[in-house]
Amino acid sequence: MPYTSSNNQNQNEKLIRLLKEQLAHSNQQNEALSKQIKSLTEQVRYLTKLLYGSKTEKSKYNTLDGQISLFDDDPSFNDSEHTEEQSQQTISYTVVRKVQNKKRNDSLHENVEVKAIHYHPENTICDCCQCQMTEIGTTIVREEAEFIPARMEKVQHIEHAYECKNCKADLSQKAQIKRGKSPQPPIQRSIAGPSVLAKVIYDKFVQYLPLYRQVKEWERYGLNTNDKNLSNWVIRASHDWLLPVYERMKNIMLEKSILHVDETYGQIINRSDGKSGQSNAYNWVFRSVPCQGPAIVLFHSSLSRSRSVLEGFIEDYSGTIVCDGYSAYDKIEGITFANCWAHVRRYWLKADSKNGRIGVKYCDELFRLEREFKHLSPSKRRKKRQKHSKPLVDEFLAWVENSPFYGKNALAKAAEYTLNRANGLKAFLDDGRIEIDNNPAENAIRPNVIGRKNWLFSVSEAGAKANAICLSIAETAKANGVDFYQYLVKLLRDLPNLDIHRNPEIINNYLPWSKTIQAECVK
């Protein structure tokens, strides 16, 4: 009996130990499943917000004390709708409207030609005494805008030849002949003159009108063409006459010490690397900062977004590049990378939680300080940043580093993104010329994104390069207050008749900020 009792006790202990191990294993599985469920719930919540929620990055956390946002983070919003009669509440509010001093006719520019149409009575004889009546005043009843459609002209360039009859009659003299010389066209043996080429390029890169949709408009004006012709015109004009201006602006830009850089995708159908036309190509944008001279915006077309593309464009550049957190912006000799706080804020905004709101609050406070320092000189801005922004940045990074954020959820990703780019995020503190975000580059690349939705793709790499050149000239002209159409007409009319290849310094007189262009092409 004692042996049997001891044997049973051992079996019970083994059973209890086995059950405890199973329980511990089950608890571990439950904990892992709970984390997975939490992560999936966050993903579903984030995707639902992307699909149905507001697309703005404006913080929804900046509400007055005691108030909450409608629908945001409200679980009852996901419940079924109640069909019974609801209680009603009357809310009174006052709408304050700004006084509009602008009149309707102020929409017309001051330099618009005025045409007056006068209306006199059919009979100016007095019905009473039959005497001639005298005019006592006029009244402008209304003003209206009138559109005069564009018209097409065929311009014939005719060269006249002259000879000397006296020398011709004297057999001992050499015949004397003089001939008038017409200016060189932008494209040899082409019907497209400077104004037509400028209109095609302007409509595509400012009005975002694809070439195939321009064909009907040109036919209405009286020019029969097709989209292939228009494409060839854009490529030739860009390569022959706009590219030298582009290259000169690039050389000037790379002499500056601070640049904003960003990139976006596109499509090129016929690729030289053998990849499918469905593969992404890329357009890079480079923008100078306002405190370092005239604004320059340059686009660069490439088949990839690898670091080698950036290195090939900037060559031996040394300075600071303001950018997002993409891995290509790193480890290039001679370059300091300043990271964008707007991207950091987006990550914490996605982490829709209490800690996420804390991260967003830190970022919002930094941006609030930057708005206060906006109009200061770079040296004064640096001093203010050292005094007010630096302690806030140090406190934020310390909070992130000491907080237990781990896993694959949005909060852990925000923390990892922030800590991995800590040095780049501190760069703006030591230089008052560096912006806190990369918004200038993102705003500069927007025309390419709008155009992509209209053009859809480039057929060839030559077409993509021409697009980048034209966009660069267009955006740089606009940034310097120059009318892009007038500027194009001048470039395409003057440059073919100047020896710009042997005397490249001539291009300096045709840059958007030059005195010549500012005098003739300012809006």
Image (cartoon, rainbow, N blue to C red):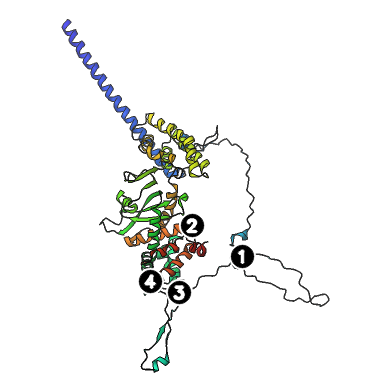
Crowd around label 3: few <14 · some 14–19 · many ≥20 (10 Å): few
Label disc, if present, on residue 222 of the rendered structure = 3
Q: Give the residue at mark 2.
A: 480
495 is higher (above) or lower (below) than 267: below
- Hey, what amino acid is under mark 1? Glu
449 is higher (above) or lower (below) than 352: below
**What SS does tag 4 mark?**
loop
| In the foreground, 52 or 262 | 262
- Hey, what amino acid is under mark 3? Gly
- Hey, what amino acid is under mark 2? Asn
Percent from the top left, x then y, of residue 223? 43, 73
Q: Which quadrant would residue 238 be assigned to in this image?
A: bottom left
- Marks 1 and 4: in contact by CB < 8 Å? no
Judge from the rendering whether residue 1 lies leftward or rightward of residue 90; answer left or right.
left
Judge from the rendering whether residue 232 lies leftward or rightward of residue 131; answer left or right.
left
| In the foreground, 379 or 50 | 379
Q: Nearer the viewer, mark 4 or mark 1?
A: 4
Q: Earlier in the sequence, mark 2 or mark 4?
A: 4
Q: Gap between marks 2 and 4, in whole Å?
A: 28 Å
Judge from the rendering whether residue 489 lies leftward or rightward of residue 312; answer left or right.
right
Q: Earlier in the sequence, mark 2 or mark 3?
A: 3
**What SS does tag 1 mark?**
loop
Label disc, if present, on residue 187 of the rendered structure = 4
Q: Gap between marks 3 and 4, in whole Å?
A: 20 Å
Label disc, if present, on residue 144 of the rendered structure = 1
